[in-house]
Amino acid sequence: MINLVQKFYKNKKVLILGHTGFKGSWLTAVMSDFGAKVYGISNGIVSNPSNYEVSKINSLSKNYYIDIRNFKKFKNIFKKINPDVVFHLAAQSLVRKSYDDPYETWSTNILGTLNFLEILKTYSEKKKIISVIITSDKCYKNVNKKQGYKEDEILGGFEPYGASKASVEILFHSYYQSFFKIKKNIFTATARAGNVIGGGDWSKDRILPDLIKTHINKKILKVRNPDSTRPWQHVLDPVFGYAYLGFNLNKKPNLINGQSFNFGPYKQKNYSVNRLLLEINKHIPKLKWKIKILKNSFHEASLLNLNAKKTYKNLKWSNKLNFKQSVLLTANWYNIYLKSKNMKNFTFSQIQNYKKNLK
Ligand SMILES: NC(=O)c1ccc[n+]([C@@H]2O[C@H](COP(=O)([O-])OP(=O)(O)OC[C@H]3O[C@@H](n4cnc5c(N)ncnc54)[C@H](O)[C@@H]3O)[C@@H](O)[C@H]2O)c1
């Protein structure tokens, strides 16, 4: 199937909203590897260093730097690109920042998506557009359920980030039911992924980036929620999953259009933060951390499980890397970075090796 997926994207104009970010930079590399003509829209480079820069992702796409909340600019660039496929990953993506700046979080995640949906709604009927909108596992109302959340479960979101992502889901489904369902040219779906690890993430307040940064600065990381479990997955798993979702929107629109899909470990194997730290320490020696439950620490769900059966059934997609393999790939990337800093070849070699898992 991977050959068919690659063939579908080859020479297609693929626009990635949020292409400078952690996942967006990997997706840009994958789409470029598939032979797509890649375009990116972002509002800047999210961290220093960033995968976008150290893996030279900027050379793989035509880049536009604008704020997607600016409808006029966004629409003009969108029309100029006239894409065949769009992946929407542009967001304020951090839970802690959503407490510090809820307005920025809500306005980026909601208004940015609203502008995108509005552009699709008014787009020429002559042009077919496939689009995948990335939300999050945090869109579900978290009731500390042990079995994984299924796609038809209640949406919620405690913290501003999760609530904004739940609202993006509601917004999307409303646009689908009201407008896209009767349009013959717009095919869209949402993707809800769990926590992602992988080389090149330098975001603040994410456990592995924080650990690597404290390691580089010869400090000790304070770990706030050691027992929280997450459906950790390597970035290449959801990124290839999104590519399969776009492919299936084209291949079997009747089944996929207007739907939401979970992307996470298929057999619901979740691990704690503590276990993640112990596992990565096997591959990057001398990492240092201590458990420190901070007073007034912000609320984060302690248990999050996803049920990815619908994704497997409809897209024939499931994650290819287990927990240990995901951590190993992540550690390998940072180990090379600690020596070299130029990650382009290594990032592409990880993509090539990953593809060997696919039939
Ligand atoms: N990383 C994870 O563990 C994870 C888990 C679940 C869901 N997600 C979701 O996946 C998507 C990508 O996550 P990530 O980790 O790559 O995020 P990131 O923070 O690394 O990147 C965000 C991207 O969005 C762009 N962006 C932000 N605000 C913008 C604006 N106003 N206008 C234009 N561009 C803007 C940034 O420039 C950047 O390119 C997000 O929607 C996030 O919520 C991430």
Image (spheres, rainbow, N blue to C red):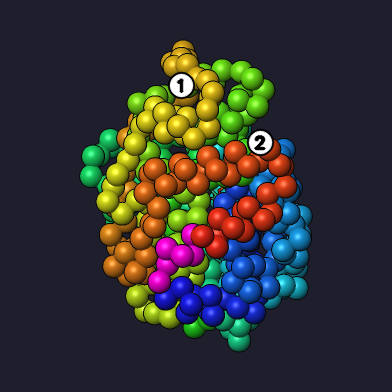
Residue annotated with mark 1: 224
Inspect this view and state whether residue 165 appears.
Answer: no
Q: Which mark is residue 305?
A: none
Q: Main secondary structure of the magenta part?
A: loop
Q: x, y percentage for residue 246?
A: 49, 70
Q: Amino acid at mark 1?
A: Arg
Which image quarter is the N terminus in?
bottom left
Identify the residue at horizontal 47%, vertical 16% (top origin).
290
Q: Nearer the viewer, residue 202 or 125?
A: 202
Mark 1 and mark 2: Cα distance apart in space? 25 Å
Inspect this view and state whether residue 263 appears.
Answer: yes
For label 2, being within 8 Å of ligand 1 is answered: no
Identify the residue at horizontal 72%, vertical 42% (top origin).
341
Residue annotated with mark 2: 338
Q: Residues within 10 Å of mark 1 (few under 14, many from 20)?
A: some
Which image quarter is the C terminus in?
bottom left
What residue range appears in magenta?
A: 354-359
Helix, strand, or loop for circle 2? helix
Left/right of residue 55 with respect to residue 306 in the rendered view = right
Q: x, y percentage for residue 26?
A: 59, 55
Name which quarter of the figure residue 106 lies in: top right
Q: Nearer the viewer, residue 90 or 60?
A: 60
As drawn, 252 above or below 211: below
Q: Nearer the viewer, residue 69 or 327?
A: 327
Helix, strand, or loop for circle 1? loop
Identify the residue at horizontal 62%, vertical 53% (top origin).
347
Q: x, y percentage for residue 51?
A: 66, 47
Identify the residue at horizontal 44%, vertical 17% (top origin).
291
Q: Amino acid at mark 2?
A: Leu
As drawn, 94 above or below 356: above
Instruction: Compare marks 1 and 2 and give the one earlier in the sequence.
Output: 1
